[in-house]
Image: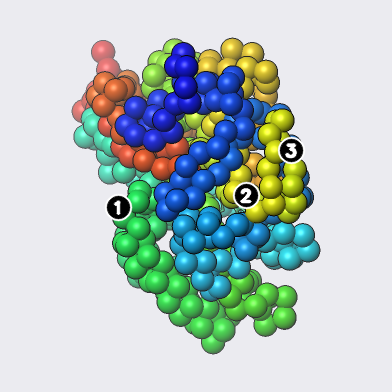
Amino acid sequence: MPASPPQLHGPAFEADPHPAYRWLREHAPVHRVDLPGGAWAWLVTRYEDARRVLADPGMLKDPMAGHEVWRRAGLGLPHDHRPSLVHSMVNTDGPDHARLRRVAGGAFTPRRVRSLVEGAERVTAGLLDRIADSGEADLVRDLAYPLPIAVICDILGVPEADRPEFHRRAAVIDSSSPEELAAVAETTDWFDSYLSALVDSRLAAPCDDLLGDLVESHRAGELSRDEVTSAAFLLLVAGHETTVALLGNMLFTLLRRPGRLERLRADRELLGPAVEEALRLESPLQNATWRFPREATTVGGVELTAGEPVLVSLLAAGRDPERYEDPDAFVPDRGASHLSFGHGAHFCVGAQLARMEARVAVGAVLDRLPGLRLAVDESELRWWPSMIMHGLFALPVRFDRPGPAGCSGR
Ligand code: HEM
């Protein structure tokens, strides 16, 4: 265990951030971290502190509540905080937040999500058809990445013809490495104009999709036009890369524990609990989104002043030994709740959708890819260099190819 605070960036941290978070939970549970652009934030790593901060209405989400150094550093997304993309529920508090959440949240009720299962199964089957005969694949590129974007495009109502460009652009927006900020800014402009044109088309001709519903709320005076485009942008950003990371992290978690993988293959009742345990163990969102104290407050014995940025580490909280017995073990039957979808007023609106996609995707992989194993050594896997996300770039695997038709496998 190192004597001083560990580095929270670089290849070693990205490959295995858990030792650093263990150190912080034990020695500096509310720790000041330096950020790009001269900014800094408080990082909260213990489960109980994390839960309290997430639920605290005095911890504001409006970026204008953040102090000036943070705002100048342009760390939120979009980086220039433009009104057409930033007026969404994740950046608002109180009654405004409740209004935005009520309007967009209707698309993700358990009933609506059930109606999306068949579509997700069809997309997954098509993706697995493409790789099943080859005996090898990259499960991030070939499955985890394309499935969630197809589902979101369906929900939003992105026309088929625009989807290849939409997919390509989403890949750039998902990139959060500092070298790629210029490309992200250019792509943000593209989404701004694209979503605006899509709203115009719905205003001209109503449509039965989420964007159509949002535009109807605009007509009824419930949402401004900026709020419609911001909601669509948020759903794309919040719902895509997170789900890619969940699918990749869950498959990786199973692949490094072949016994667990076989048990799940044999008993599909465990699939739901296994999704929850994978979420706890390898939270796709490393940190929750930014929060800023409305007034001076104390968290974990540390005094914070108004406007100081706060990051809650969901990855660290998920392995807090004060909350979970044997926290590094993968035990689907432990049935413990976690914070990986957040907690309180900003709890993830897409949680049911993400869970459904994980069950569909991992279930289909178990059905269709026998003898599944990692194709490289674990140490060769690359993780996103990101403060926010915790997910794999690629997951190369091998599996048994199907025998010739009619062969009984003797
Ligand atoms: C495994 C996948 C996902 C994970 C791990 C995840 C995680 C989270 C977390 C932790 C929050 C709370 C952020 C905070 O309080 O700072 C959140 C909020 C949110 N999530 Fe997700 N999410 C996932 C998938 C989705 C999907 C599929 C959608 C929709 C298509 C979605 C839409 C949202 C929205 C709109 C919010 C903001 C809610 C609010 O501010 O009231 N998420 N998500």
Question: Residue 189: which numbered mark, if any?
Answer: none
Question: Where is residue 184, by image quadrant?
Answer: bottom left
Question: Residue 179: which numbered mark, if any?
Answer: 1
Circle 2 Cα neighbour tier, 10 Å, few/some/many (<14 / 14–19 / ≥20):
many
Q: Amino acid at mark 2?
A: Glu
Q: Which residue is mark 2?
A: 308
Residue at image coords 61%, 22%: 320
> Could you give the CA–CA distance between mark 2 and mark 3, rounded to whole angstroms?
12 Å
Q: How far across and down, in percent of the image, does residue 46 sit?
A: 64, 28
- For mark 2, give the secondary structure: loop
- Mark 2 CB near ligand 1 (8 Å cut): no
Q: Work out whether residue 175 or residue 244 is closer to the camera in this orientation and state it.
A: 175
As drawn, the residue found furthest toward the bottom would be 204
- For mark 1, give the secondary structure: helix
Contact check, label 2 and label 1, Cβ < 8 Å: no
Q: Which residue is mark 3?
A: 298
Residue at image coords 47%, 22%: 4
> Could you give the CA–CA distance between mark 2 and mark 1, rounded to whole angstroms?
26 Å
Q: Amino acid at mark 3?
A: Thr
Q: Amino acid at mark 1?
A: Glu
Dot 2 or dot 3: first in sequence order is: 3
**Up/down of 363 relative to 108, above or below:** above
Q: How far across and down, in percent of the image, does residue 199 sit?
A: 52, 78
Residue at image coords 46%, 46%: 35
